[in-house]
Amino acid sequence: MNTTAKVDFASAAWVDAARTVLEELVAAHPDENLKCSVCEVFTNAPAHVAPSGTAAWHFYIDGASVTVDSGERDDVDLRLGGDYQEALPGARTVYTPEYLAERAKQEPDPEVQANIQGDMSILPPWIVELHNRLAPITA
């Protein structure tokens, strides 16, 4: 993956980058018992990212198998979403240990919580690395 080229958040190129990173992470952290699926849906996305105004992507991990694609899915364990422009700063933020420690001290934002359907604890501990590898390339 080219780590210098910026790609629009949740665009087809961004989803391709997410696929590459997820495949690398699953291979680096083998766990035949790991099974989880996630869909992220962002409304009010720019037309060049999502002509419909809704940008969405999803992934399924089943042991060593990874499936990543664009689009909305309901058959997932965890569904996240919100407004595209409001999500963008977070998508561009690298989660340092200091950032995560500070965030853990804060009360959960009710608006953010309202956009989470499912249990975040199903995610593997290394999932933050997916975010951190995508944040620097997210335009």
Image: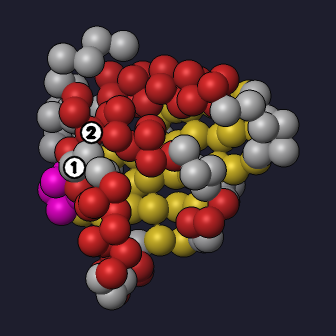
- Quadrant in which residue 27 is drawn: top right
Pointer 2 local density, CA inside 10 Å: few below 14, some 14–19, many at least 20 = many
Q: Is residue 32 left or right of residue 47?
A: right
Magenta segment, principal secondary structure? helix
- Quadrant in which residue 126 is drawn: top right
Residue 58: horizontal and vertical position, in percent? 53, 43
- The quarter of the rendered structure image containing the N terminus is top left
Taking the spot 32% from the left edge, 22% from the top edge, the residue there is 13
Against 89, is 33 above or below? above
Q: Mark 2 belongs to which amino acid?
A: Ala
Which residue does the numbered mark 1 point to in the structure image? 93
Magenta stretch bounds: 85-89
Contact, mark 1 vs mark 2 (Cβ under 8 Å):
yes
- Per the image, label 2 sits on a secondary structure element best described as helix
- Per the image, label 1 sits on a secondary structure element best described as loop
Residue 77: horizontal and vertical position, in percent? 66, 60
In depth, the one of 109 and 28 nearer the eye is 28
Please say whether residue 72 is one of the residues in the magenta stretch.
Answer: no
Which residue does the numbered mark 2 point to in the structure image? 135
- The quarter of the rendered structure image containing the C terminus is top left
